[in-house]
Amino acid sequence: MIRPFRSLVTASDPLAALCLVVAIIAVEGCAPTRGPVRENVVEIEEIDVVPATEVEEKLATAGEQARKEMDAEKAVADKVIEAATDAAGPAAVVAETEKVLLGEPSLTAGVPGEGAITPEQIDAWLADPKNHRMLEPELPLGLSQAAGQVRGLAENPLTRAKIELGRQLYFDTRLSADSTVSCASCHDPAFGYTAHTKTGVGIRGQLGGRNSPVSFNRILSGPQFWDGRADSLEAQAVGPIANPIEMGFTHEGVVKRLSEIPVYARQFEKIFGELTIDRVGQAIAAFERVIVTAPSPYDYHEQLRPFVKLDPDDIADDADLAARFAAAKAAAEAHPMSESATRGRELFFGKANCSACHVGANLADEKFHNLGVGMAAAEPDPGRFAVTKDEQDRGAFKTPTVRNVALTAPYMHDGSQATLAEVVAWYDKGGHANSQLSDKIKPLNLTEQERADLVEFLKACTGETPRVEIARLPIAADL
Ligand code: HEC
Ligand code: HEC
């Protein structure tokens, strides 16, 4: 079992701490305001040539910096817990907290038992105080670099009971008017939490206007939808229920229906003290926040990089560091990136400039850009403009994550591109000219090999999502 990078390297070991700092610099280096990663990692090479005293000084500063980082992180965590305890309201959240690594399968395994969930089973589940402990989630390797970007936990604390309620709601077609469509119809775990249709297909086979984006790694994401019109995951979650071409129901209708299903009524009562549409949104959002991508070959590759940059003699001199290096190396070898993907990584963060927007742990800057997709249509989708009414935002859409993107064809907000090769070709030709085209989109003049390398890199960003119980849902009201 490979632990996240942060726990592999501790502040008590200056050399390792430096390594941590370098890793942090490397990640920050992907930010659009700074240069590509490679430029920022030179610091470590400088160390080889500076006098010993200066090295020590640097190491001390690095250690100090790493300690400060950790203190700051702890302060944030404490604040979150405090705020979350306040926000918990009448609910059954117990004071004790539990640290949990996201992706841990017990979080999404469902209420114990077989078949439809019965009132007796749910009562036993709700009676267990463990299920109401506030969870302190840790992110898996890769995403863990973004611990500071975690959203929504203070307002909507995670508990096992709430996540389980959200899981049931997510897969339950009874949230749609004619009980045919669930969230999973368009964000299906079997298809990388999307659907392989060009646009969403709702009740009575109605077609939506946009492609279904992924519903994982939402714990690192703020505004939702391609145009960012929902401020939070909670606000987003209740949208589709009342959307006439998605689930086609009303908020009053769904609240009434859920209140008539005893297993749901009991859960809302115990967890929230009430059954309202906002509570439905909170439960679904809690479930979505624990669906994260496990480390991909890319993440294991990144974990190894800082070690590779260190002087082998320095590693050999430090038994602890040597052990960590060996562990990172073994992990990278067990999840290899091909040579082509490794070249693709260099292009992605370098010459092809993908990291101008696909940055940070989730490889998405959470901002809106116009690539010209769909701009040749008779009536182009206004995109972000519909929210801000700013002409600059016309045709701009939120940068999607490229994690697990190999599983989620077709691509772009309108589902107009069928393959990753097509997407890369789009960037290579500089998108589609229009008056709001992003200044970051320019012809790349890539060779055929380079285009193939980029596709291989995108494929190397694939990590597993947690095992999720899909079938076990509350037993029908009249049984
Ligand atoms: C009929 C298909 C369909 C159904 C059903 C559906 N969605 Fe979506 N979902 C979409 C589409 C299409 C979008 C993008 C819409 C837009 O941006 O305007 C979307 C957007 C989202 C997003 C935003 C992701 C991002 O990157 O901004 C989340 C999260 C999400 N849906 C979760 C859910 C949940 C939870 C449910 C159930 C309550 C649900 N969806 C039901 C098709 C669907
Ligand atoms: C200017 C910011 C920007 C840059 C630079 C950029 N992207 Fe994107 N990327 C986006 C946005 C925004 C979208 C969605 C656009 C839309 O649907 O209109 C997107 C979509 C994608 C998608 C489709 C994802 C999906 O789920 O539909 C892939 C794959 C992708 N980009 C890969 C890349 C690669 C590879 C590069 C470098 C060659 C790159 N991007 C450069 C912003 C950017």
Image (spheres, grey):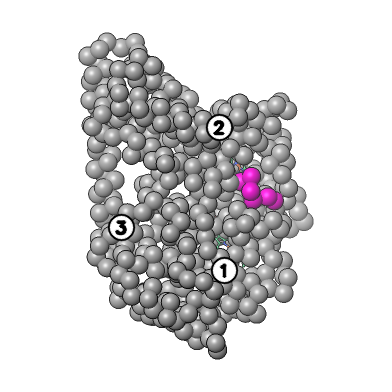
Mark 3: few, some, or many residues within 10 Å (few <14, many ≥20)? some
Residue type at mark 1? Ala
Question: Which image quadrant shows ligand 1?
Answer: bottom right
- Residue 10 percent location from the top left of the image: 28, 34
Q: Which residues are magenta?
A: 405-410
Q: Position of residue 114 (x, y in %)?
A: 51, 71
**Crowd class of label 1 (few under 14; some 14 to 19; many from 20; radius 10 Å):** some
Depth-wise, is mark 1 or mark 3 nearer the camera?
A: 1
Secondary-structure class at tag 3 = strand
Residue tagged by mark 1? Answer: 471
> What percent of the width, then of the height, locates residue 144?
40, 44
Q: Position of residue 99 (x, y in %)?
A: 32, 54
Please, what is the three-letter code of the amino acid marked with disc 2?
Pro
Q: Is residue 111 left or right of residue 78?
A: right
Q: Which residue is mark 2?
A: 336
Three-letter amino acid code at disc 3?
Glu
Front residue (pair 6, 448): 6
Q: Quadrant of the C terminus?
A: bottom right
Figure label count? 3
Residue placed at 39% from the left, 51% from the top?
A: 101
Picture quarter containing residue 80? bottom left
Secondary element under disc 2, as helix, strand or loop, is loop
User: Is residue 136 among the parts visible in the rendering?
Assistant: yes
- How much space separates mark 2 and mark 3, taking CA atoms? 33 Å
The answer as to whether callout 2 falls within 8 Å of ligand 2 is no
Is 207 placed above or below 437 here? below
Question: Badges 1 and 2: C-beta atoms under 8 Å apart?
Answer: no
Per the rendering, the mark at residue 139 is none
Whichever of callouts 1 and 3 sits on the residue coming sooner in the sequence is 3
